[in-house]
Amino acid sequence: MAGKVVLHYFNGRGKMESIRWLLTVAEVDFDEVFLTTREQYLKLLSDGDLMFQQVPFVEMDGMKLVQTKAILNYIAEKHNLHGKDLKDKLMVNTHSEGLMDLMDMIMTLPFTADVKTKLDNIQNKAKDRYLPVFEKALSGPIYLVGGRLSCADVQLLECTLMLEEKFAGILAEFPNLKSFQGRMTRIPAVSRFLQPGSKRKPQPDDVYVKTIMEVFNIKSPFL
């Protein structure tokens, strides 16, 4: 019998946060091992755990999983959160990858020299390129694809909450998205995850950035 799911990452959001969200919605309990030193990272490398020398790294079902999209797809497929047929899976993946593009921009903010310019770019792209797509997709259906909850819905909630942390009121022009957000936050597992003391991570701080720089031996983090 496979043991408990274990996540290996920093004590912060980053690319692991979407995995935490999806496991939570799938009602899968997990433990976390936080990377705090370069020695931990080098041991993972020497043990052959990191196929491409990168984290996230997840131990699940007797396997050592790497690459964020692959991990998310595995969890979604296993827990019936990936669409009912091939065409639905394609649309789920399409929405998911668009959301990951947008969230990646937010994730890199702590490593950006010109934060204001980057924030302006994120806000403009969110309002002009990304949010209108999801607003249209939710004009009638309660979920993005096939009338059922999928990993794309979970990522959309995560993404809209991240955007609101940076741009209060950004959803004011997107009523379908705001209604969707309200429905999603009433899911019991989601509601628990949003409470203080859960495994959801706060916005990145200086300690998070410093730890990443030290673990990966990065001298200049700014993009």
Image: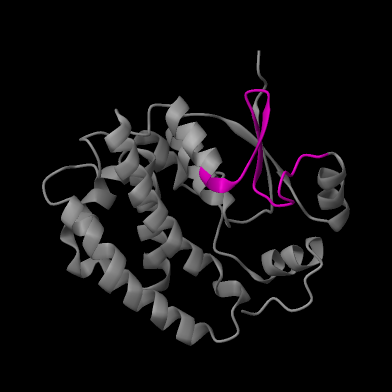
Would residue 54 be seen by someone viewing this image from the given angle?
yes
List x then y, in percent, for residue 202: 55, 59
Is 85 placed above or below 17 here?
Answer: above
For residue 75, side relative to residue 134 (left or right): right
Q: Is residue 61 magenta?
A: yes
Q: Give the residue at x 41% y 35%.
A: 189
Q: Give the residue at x 76% y 51%.
A: 35
Which picture quadrant has residue 48? Answer: top right
- Pick the front one: 90 or 73: 90
Which picture quadrant has residue 190? Answer: top left
Q: Which residues are magenta?
A: 48-69
List x then y, in percent, for residue 31: 66, 35
Q: Give the residue at x 71% y 49%.
A: 52
For residue 158, side relative to residue 129 (left or right): right
List x then y, in percent, for residue 172: 21, 68
- Pick the front one: 108 or 31: 108
